Amino acid sequence: MKLRGKLPPDFLAGEIFSRLPLPSEEDVILGPSIGEDAAILRVGDELLAIHSDPVTGGGKLAGWLSVFVASNDIATRGVRPRWLLPVFLFREGADESEILSLVEQVGDAARRVGASIVGGHTEVTPNLGFNIVVTTAMGLGRRVLNTRDAKLGDLIVLTKECALEGTAILSTELFNELKSRGIDEELLKRAGSFIEDISVLKESIIASKFEGVHSMHDPTEGGVLGGVQELAIASGLGFRIYEDRIPLREETVAICDALKVDPLKLISSGSLLIAVSRESVDELISALEREGVRASVIGELTDRESGMILLRKDGSSERISEPVMDELWRLLS
């Protein structure tokens, strides 16, 4: 089996988890699980959300992305990130300016989310072709949300637009290639600025206050389509989503068309998936939009037997039965 990117859920559950000493203590509220964004531990009267994530395809933006990707997974629990531990793995040959650039990105992003650096690690690693940053984020809360708690019949809300992170990475890493394919330089610069929109902290905290919000999930690798699939698997449900309801920015459309990329399968940090009751959806969307966060209903959660269905703009129907491979790996590997 040739693997790339995230390991398939069946392989994780059947082969990986079985070889690990999984927790049984009462203070471990949520341990390793398919589709869950963060572990939850009881610490006194509070709950600690903790998550680690690598950025392996971020290129020049790896430091900035690493903080937001890890922090977003804490935010989906309805918890503000407070502490970060970044691990910097620098490629051999990385010069001082390259190293300091990534460190400064981590510092700037940490300030943006209101977290402090409490530890970590730095090294130059043999045989790396590119720099990797792995960040662990932690935060405390009293009420947390689990991905697995989405309900049958919930509507699926997506904040902002699809594929913001992927658009920013592709416009930065393939800048010259995209220019050679006729993409306007100003459009590429605008696309690169999407990196400023990667945090979902604001919308997560707003949504977590609604009783009708049952689950939130961060669509990263595998894009929005992969994120909805993970949410459904975690909750033991199916879904029906509609391509024509999933918003895209014009820069994303131009870049994806030029590279023949499906934006629904392109890494999508910056968007938040929210499973919300039909009774609460209008109030939720109004609350988000009052704070300047765009939100769209893109589908609904169905019973597992109905399957995982994507309805394309042309009227065709796709059954999403296999793990979604991110388009970024296909382009940059």
Image: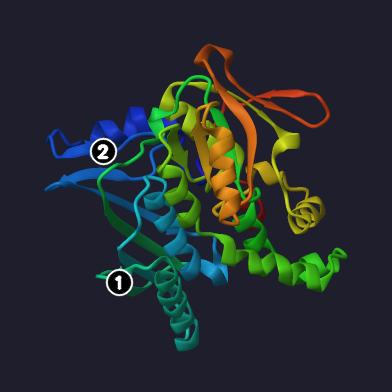
Q: Is residue 290 visible?
A: yes
Task: In this rendered view, identify the residue nearer to me: 33 or 292.
Answer: 292
Q: Earlier in the sequence, mark 2 or mark 1?
A: 2
In the picture, measured across the screen, residue 144 lies left or right of residue 283, that is left
Whether 330 is drawn above or below 133: the answer is: above
- Quarter residue 173 falls in: bottom right
Q: How far apart are the two marked residues, 2 and 1, measured between alpha carbons?
A: 24 Å
The residue where tag 2 is placed is 31
Whole-percent x and y of residue 110? Answer: 40, 70
Looking at numbered disc 2 in the image, what kind of residue is underneath it? Gly
- Quarter residue 314 falls in: top right
The residue where tag 1 is placed is 117
Q: Which residue is painted at 72% across and 44% down in the image?
A: 262
Which structural element holds mark 2? loop
Whole-percent x and y of residue 112? Answer: 45, 70
Task: In this rendered view, identify the residue nearer to me: 134 or 232.
Answer: 232
Q: Is residue 324 visible?
A: no
